[in-house]
Image: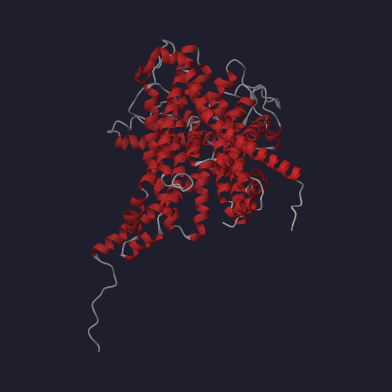
Amino acid sequence: MSAVPTTPSLASRRRLGDRLGDLSLRGLTLASALAVLVLLGAIVWKVVDLARPSISKYGLSFLTGETWDPVKKVFGALPFIYGTALSSLVALVIATPLAIAIGLWLSELAPRGVRGLIGSLVEMLAAIPSVVLGLWGILVLGPFLAQHLEPWLHDKLGFIPIFGAPEATGTGLFTAGLILTIMIVPIIASICRELFLQVPGELEEGAMALGATRWEMVRGVILPATRTGIAAAIILGLGRALGEAIAVTQVIGGGTRISSNVFGPSDTLASKIAASYQGAATALESSSLLYLAAILLVIGLLTNLAAQVIVRRFDPLRGGR
Amino acid sequence: MSAAAPHFSLQPSGRLRRRRIVNRIMEGVGTGAALIAVGVLGLVIVSVAVRAAPALSWDFLTKPPNLFGGPGGGISSAIVGSGLIVLVATAMALPLGVLVAIYLTEFAPRAVAAPIQLVLDVLNGLPTIVTGIFVYGLLVIGHAQSAFAGAFALGIVMLPLVARAAQETLLLVPSALREGSLALGVSRWRAVLGVILPTTFGGILTGAVLAVARAAGETAPLLFTTSIFNPSVSTDVTHALPNIPVLIFTYSEQPDKALHEQAWGAALVLMAFVLIASLTAKALLARSRSKLGR
């Protein structure tokens, strides 16, 4: 009855074109996806390769070496691993409760009218470039801390060794920790807010109907339900704090001594690389700095993998689809 | 009829009173925490703006730095350099990111998508100084610093952001659209390029703007790739170009007050750009969401 209004040759040509189009789009996108895998592989290989002279000289004892002395050509990473751990610890101790409280406030308490606005402002805190935050840290926050907060803490709590004598300039590990706090609070807070919003409303209403106060509902229902997610958020924040180079370099003061005084100058893995690379005098020194980068890379990979494995269990976009 | 009214006190007492007080305190803590965050944001913005005010002038934005330091001079060369570097980085990261997102949402079987997704997320969390070191080893050692190397490093930082944004938007496309076009006999590639991708334009643009905002403030990847430069205005990406983040960083490490003032001015310019870009992205996102009916 009805003839197909195309000649056979035209139809087959179109089919060929479509098959080629399908194939090339699939091929092109697959190649791009593979390029991402290759990119990460290349980063790992290149950084380790650059550090090779120092790796072959020191091996793993580099990790426990306590001295970093370019004059005597002795290099060890322990002061910087210590500085990284301590500054991130300061940041996490302050940021975690603050960020969870902000997440709870945004998801449960905030009046509808300001919820979106305050949420955006908190996220905007994460958008401030780290170099600007560092500039503010070195010229505004540091001097303020040195004149007011640090002497006071040293006076009142000086018997605890971590509150040692403050630096006159206000640069030091504690200032770096505070700057890192500002950087990771919005990260942890916005993940927490999303988590808290995912808790089923029936559970929350059920708790309220049983007579729980809002806080009891939070403590009894929301926090237990989102525990693992909060852990992942904290690890993601930690990853950011461990790897931040610029702002920390600006405020941490620079130093290679391991000291319990949080007000003293120090260096993290990332800040040491950023501060010293231009001035590296010998090949061994620069490859040792790159060894620090390799350590940082491994730490960065591990924290991110850990966080992602946990996140995957929750995020509908990722796992569980 | 008038049985004695039961003696309920409507005033909370004892345990209930304590629970209510604890509740109040915790509510106060939450509100206080949110206020602290907003307060810090305000404090940083205001103190940058106040300190930048004396430096800001038309000349500051349109003149290159004074060759021998000292007062006067501006940051025009750094603005041009930063703009170029971010532009080249976007030109590299945007197409690649969109292609990766198309593969992940339209083609990939789950077993293949999962590891690629993981690698993208890990790449997103990698310390940017490591990215800088990688590009330094790849493009700078044996050659010289160049704006292109800096752009390549920033492109790596932007890639996972762009890919993630594109992917999220692609997932929002109603499957009716996808199925409808396939049912009409449209081939897969035409459906993707002609029907699906155009609806995601807004979302991808948002992601690109956010990634640009993030990249514009990144310093660590540029420190090893384009930090030793001639301060005059240039558009040659095969040489190291002055740029705003590195300028702020180097000036902030100097003891010179005049340089600090310049650093504050540059910081205000950078921050204004980043914040305005983020706000624009948010507005775009709201628009494209409402268009897709979500």
Quarter of the image with the N terminus of chain B is bottom left
Name the quadrant containing residue A304.
top left
Number of numbered markers: 0
Visible in this render: residue B115?
yes
Residue B264 percent across, percent down from the top left: 58, 35
Point out residue A11 in the picture as x, y percentages from the top left corner.
73, 45
Please tell me which residue is depicted at 40% across the width and 30% down the height of the picture.
A173
The reply, left or right, for residue A209 in relation to residue A22 is: left
Which sits in the foreground, A112 or B112?
B112
Colour mode? secondary structure
Residue B28 vertical position relative to residue B127 in the rendered view, above or below: below
Asked whether residue B54 is in view, the answer is no
Q: Position of residue B77 (x, y in %)?
A: 68, 29
Residue sticking out furthest to the bottom: B1
- Is residue B52 toward the left or the right of residue B76 in the image? left
Q: Is residue B41 left or right of residue B155?
A: left
Q: Position of residue B278 (x, y in %)?
A: 58, 45
Image point (50%, 12%), residue name: A281
The furthest residue to the top: A72
Q: Is residue B280 left or right of residue A231?
A: right
The one of A255 and A154 positioned closer to us in this rendering:
A255
Q: Depth check: give the residue in front, B34 or A186.
A: A186
- Quadrant assignment for the C terminus of chain B: bottom right
